[in-house]
């Protein structure tokens, strides 16, 4: 004979939250295992530290001026 298990709304909300957190962990591990992605992140961090960045709006303005968009 099988037993019934009652899941409350609070339990369901907790399961949804835990499920979302597990998805984030899996995605993080995938990125950490991707050598190319990690190299790109390190390069981006170095660019930020060195000031080799610009505002998004300025970037769009440059693309429009050069006819790239």
Image (cartoon, rainbow, N blue to C red):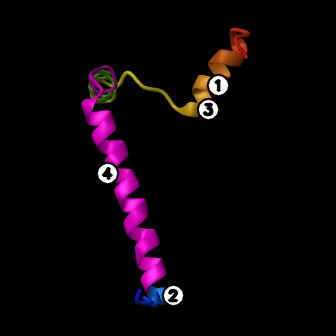
Determine whether, in the image, residue 26 is placed left or right of residue 54: left
Instruction: Pick whichever of labels 2 and 1 is earlier in the sequence.
Output: 2
From the image, state whether disc 3 or disc 2 is nearer to you: 2
> Observer-nearest residue: 37 or 66?
37
Alpha carbon of mark 2 to alpha carbon of mark 1: how far? 46 Å
**Cα–Cα span, label 2 and label 4:** 24 Å
Element class at badge 2:
helix
Mark before the other along the chain sequence, 2 or 4: 2
Seen in the picture, residue 9 relative to 33 is either above or below; the reply is: below
User: Which residues fall within the magenta stretch?
Assistant: 11-38
| Residue located 70% across and 11% down the image | 68
Callout 4: SS: helix
Q: Nearer the viewer, mark 1 or mark 4?
A: 4
Residue designated by label 3? 57
Badge 1 marks a residue whose secondary structure is helix
Q: CA distance from mark 1 to mark 4?
A: 33 Å
Question: Going by the picture, which residue comes out furthest to the top?
Answer: 66
According to the picture, the residue beneath numbered tag 2 turns out to be 9
């Amino acid at each position: 004979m099988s037993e019934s298990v009652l899941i409350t709304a609070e339990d369901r909300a907790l399961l949804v939250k835990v499920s979302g957190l597990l998805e984030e962990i899996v995605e993080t591990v995938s990125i950490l295992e991707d050598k190319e992605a990690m190299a790109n992140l390190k390069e981006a961090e170095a660019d930020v530290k060195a000031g080799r960045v610009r505002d998004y709006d300025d970037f769009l303005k440059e693309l429009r001026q050069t006819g790239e968009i």
